[in-house]
Amino acid sequence: MDGNDTTPDDGSERRTETGTEDDDTDATSPELADSADGERSDDETAAETAGDEAASTTQDVALTDPEYFLNRELSELAFQRRVLEEALDERNPLLERVKFLAIFTKNMDEFFMKRVGGLKQQMAAGVSELTPDGRTPEEQWKEIFAQARPLFAEQTDCFVQEIEPALAEAGIEIVDHDDLDPAVRADLRSYFEESILPTLTPLTFDPAHPFPFISNLSLSMAVLTESEDDPTFTRIKIPENRPRFVRLGDVSEAAGDGTRFVSIDDLLAANLDLLFPDVAVLDHSMFRVTRNAEVRRNEEVAEDLIDMIQGVLQERRFATVVRLEISEDMPVAVRELLVDQLDLADREVVERRGMLDYRDLLTIADLDRPELQRESWTPQPHPRLLPSDGEETDLFAEIKRDDILVHHPYHSFDDTVQRFLRTAAEDPDVLAIKAAIYRTARDSQVIQSLIDAAQNGKQVAVMVELKARFDEENNLRWVQRLEEEGIHVAYGTLGLKTHTKTALVVREEGDTVRQYAHVGTGNYHSQTAKTYVDLGLLTADRDVGQDLVRLFNFFTGHSLYETYRKLLIAPENMRGRFRDLIRNEAAVAEATDGEAGKIVCVMNRLEDPDLVRELYEASMAGVEIDLVVRDICRLRPGIDGVSDTVSVRSIVGRFLEHSRIFYFGNGATVDTDTAEPGEPQYFTGSADWMTRNLDRRVEAITPIEDESLRQHLRAIVTIMLADNRRAWEMGPDGEYERVTPDEGEPVRDTHELLMARTEQAVARARATSDSDPVFDLEDPLARADIDVDRDGPV
């Protein structure tokens, strides 16, 4: 902050650069079960898994002890603090800081909707199982509010004390209506009457009118008016289809040409007499409601998955309220009324000074003021796919020559993944295309390519995951469109959520039928591909192709294969393979007295207690373990005798880190399908190390076998582990500390370095026709003018 997505959600696209995702996210969060429906949460399942496993006692350390596990919810809150720090960081451009204030609000909204909503369901159902860190649902719920309140206060202080004055100094002002000249106020009143007043619907609560429905995340004004008995309460919803900040110069010539705005709620307050003529307005104050998004139905008894999803969307509108934000000047009587009618505990009320909803600050962040923003980035073509002698590269021939690793947003999504599908749709030799869609853009060219392929006579099969949270409506629309074109569509998998990012093209080449595959970490989403960091493999490897044939047969059929040639597929072989790979490194370390044994992982989240325990045991055996985990991490690094050899860092910056890279040194014999004894092993794909990803989702991880692509991954990880600008390091207590350069040390920013490296690689390829990837492999950090130990991070 899946989501966190870095353009925050504008209602048309799903994610922010530093938002939650999936989560993935994606935004993005593991499902907390409604225990009344008989489902299990990640924490409940994980606690049982950890308990059912032998209580591992390497060197007399009980690795199931709660002290060795951080709390999943509080770890996510720690990530949101790091997101907020991007707004607090004076080194960032001003409008970038404004954007991160909006991102923080969006991320926290999703956190309360999903995670707090799920906890509240568990509390209502009487769930008492402890999480791996030893907390009940109620204890987590209380701690979340205790830790979230200071974050909200810090966000407000940042805006009021730092951002707003800095904006004013830069000539960008959000002004109070009452401070404006009479002529400007008159023009604003006319604008209000013509453009806003007709959209408003005052809803009064009295014996003749029931308490009004308050929609999720809507901003509302509570108005008290005089009546014969007690004051009358009326709710007015701030319209979402009108600009939250009205630019004065757009509605009043008297305002001049400056960049000054007035908020629509301030404008409403100044014109309440137009809604309540001949009635005395006693008070007005603002409030905002957050509702639970954890609404689910039993798939086992659903007759139609589409009807079920439509029912979930309807129920979500009326779900339980999990948070009420109010302005600090709200009268006690109005607060008590809202708490009573919305059935809330006092703990769930958050008093705030000033603005309640910072998402609309994107209007300010997107102003055309380049001197106040980061330099824009344009994703580059992949060096391997540049035109040659004025002719477009033969995409399939190039993939067949060698695997291609694409790295977004450094490489253009349109020129790589989208081109792969577009070319396949137009190629007369292509027989079939299959794709798994989790999230995609509302104007998706990926979907259009699949439709074009069907219209061109190719067999097309598409797996569209209808249960992708907050994207259900968008995916339902695409299902309807695809089916209208006669395309075979699978809606999902009973009991599982399909999260793979995979596509398969079947092509006739002479007497041979060849399969071309894409296996990636990110969604087929053209917009998030501009701000999410993701990896994808384009390959003609026969074994990978055959594995995807099996996987897509499962999507459209009903039986999941248990064995695969190369791919790691959840929930079948992935957990076991990762466990074996970790244990092999431990065996290597033990056999060499700790001289060998190396694990490096880059992922979004590390939550699964079983794999955390495996990592602890590997560390105790002497394995050196470097983890780059964007947000949730249950593991505590640096515990004496348990995780001395483990480091954990998080990268938070202009792009949302969404890729997954897994490296295992493999210094001794290991029974594996993908490497000779002693050959390092690299993997990438869709899954984090979370219980939900390993056990309750369909995920795909692919080995990376081409040496040049392995070097590419090695360089990426080297840069991330050397970052001293966007990195945070975790201590044994679970607290994060920002990494800063030592005196005289150059600044190393992962995203800036990778952008520069990509531009250099493209320039070199154009100048020399050298299309081999991406980095100066002898010194991937050369731009930072430091030495790199080639036997270093990996």
Image (cartoon, rainbow, N blue to C red):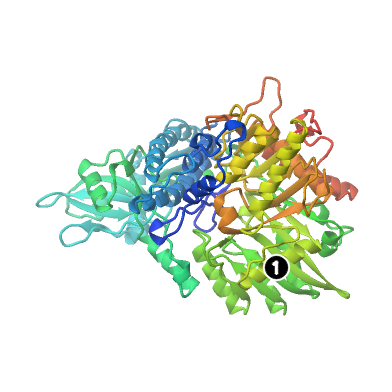
Q: Nearer the viewer, residue 63 or 574?
A: 63
Look at the image and tell me whether residue 622 can be seen: yes
- Badge 1 element: helix
Which residue is pictured at 78% across the width and 28% down the height? Answer: 785
Q: Determine which residue is flagged by label 1.
A: 550
Which residue is pictured at 23% across the width and 50% down the height? Answer: 340
Count residues near mark 1 (Cα–Cα under 10 Å), then give few for <14, some for 14-19, many for 20+.
some
Callout 1, which amino acid?
Answer: Arg
Residue 418 in which image quadrant? bottom right
Which residue is pictured at 58% across the width and 77% down the height? Answer: 483
Figure disc tally: 1
Q: What percent of the width, then of the height, locates residue 496?
A: 55, 62
Q: Nearer the viewer, residue 722 or 330?
A: 722
Q: Is residue 510 left or right of residue 423?
A: right
Q: What percent of the width, then of the height, locates residue 384?
A: 82, 54
Q: Is residue 365 left or right of residue 201?
A: right
Residue 644 in which image quadrant? top right
Q: Residue furthest left?
A: 228
Q: Is residue 126 above or below residue 422?
A: above
Q: Is residue 504 above or below residue 356?
A: below
What is the quadrant of the C terminus in the image? top right
Q: Nearer the viewer, residue 1 or 220?
A: 1
Q: What percent of the width, then of the height, locates residue 136?
A: 40, 43
Q: Nearer the viewer, residue 688 or 564?
A: 564
Look at the image and tell me whether residue 23 can be seen: no
What is the quadrant of the N terminus in the image? top right
